[in-house]
Amino acid sequence: MTIQLSPASQSIAGVVLLTIVTIEFGGWFLTKIARGDVPITQFQKNFARAGHAHAGVLVTLGLICLVLADATALEGFAGYVARAGVPFAAILMSAGFFASSAGRGEVTRPNKLFALVWLGALSLAAGVLTLGIGLLTT
């Protein structure tokens, strides 16, 4: 049995796979943090870990969702949400953790860019709900 991706899923999968290089960079940066080479607060360290973890898990889930979305044959806006919701969540949530904790000195609280985490959570919910309903109804 061969898996045939739709053109939309194939394009999204290609972009998602390319983002893994940025996740690798994040992992390298976390090793610098762990060695004490980067002067940051405990809050910033925690958010760096959260951003990196969310990126890795959601990119993996996003790739799985592409295959499942093609199995539903969802089209139009619902198909787009089912395919892109989780990959967008990976970008938004990770960016939210990193950007909201950026800065020098005693950064101990997230800035307003933390809203990206909540936008990512909405994107995640929309993607998995649309896909789940699509799988149950087709």
Image: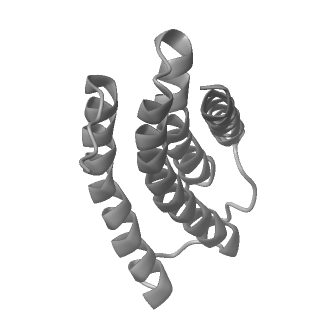
Q: For residue 15, what is the image quadrant?
A: top left
Looking at the image, residue 136 sits to the left or right of residue 138; the answer is right
Q: Is residue 97 above or below residue 107?
A: above
Residue 40, horizontal then vertical, whole percent:
56, 72
Residue 87, horizontal then vertical, whole percent:
47, 40
**Which sits in the foreground, 130 or 25?**
130
Q: Is residue 115 above or below residue 33?
A: above
Q: For residue 4, what is the image quadrant?
A: top left
**Which sits in the foreground, 47 or 69?**
69
Residue 63, horizontal then vertical, whole percent:
41, 48
Q: How is the image coloured?
A: one colour
Q: Residue at x 40, y 80 (%)?
A: 32
Q: Residue furthest front?
A: 1
**Which sits in the foreground, 137 or 129?**
137
Looking at the image, residue 9 sits to the left or right of residue 42; the answer is left
Looking at the image, residue 124 sits to the left or right of residue 12; the answer is right
Q: Residue at x 45, y 34 (%)?
A: 71
Q: Residue furthest right?
A: 109
Q: Residue furthest bottom?
A: 35
> Quadrant of the image for the C terminus?
top right
The reply to whether residue 102 is in sight is no
Residue 86, horizontal then vertical, whole percent:
54, 40
The reply to whether residue 98 is in sight is yes
Q: Residue at x 50, y 35 (%)?
A: 88
Q: Residue at x 52, y 52 (%)?
A: 58
Count of labels shown?
Answer: 0
Q: Is residue 71 above or below residue 7?
A: below
**Which sits in the foreground, 52 or 66?**
66
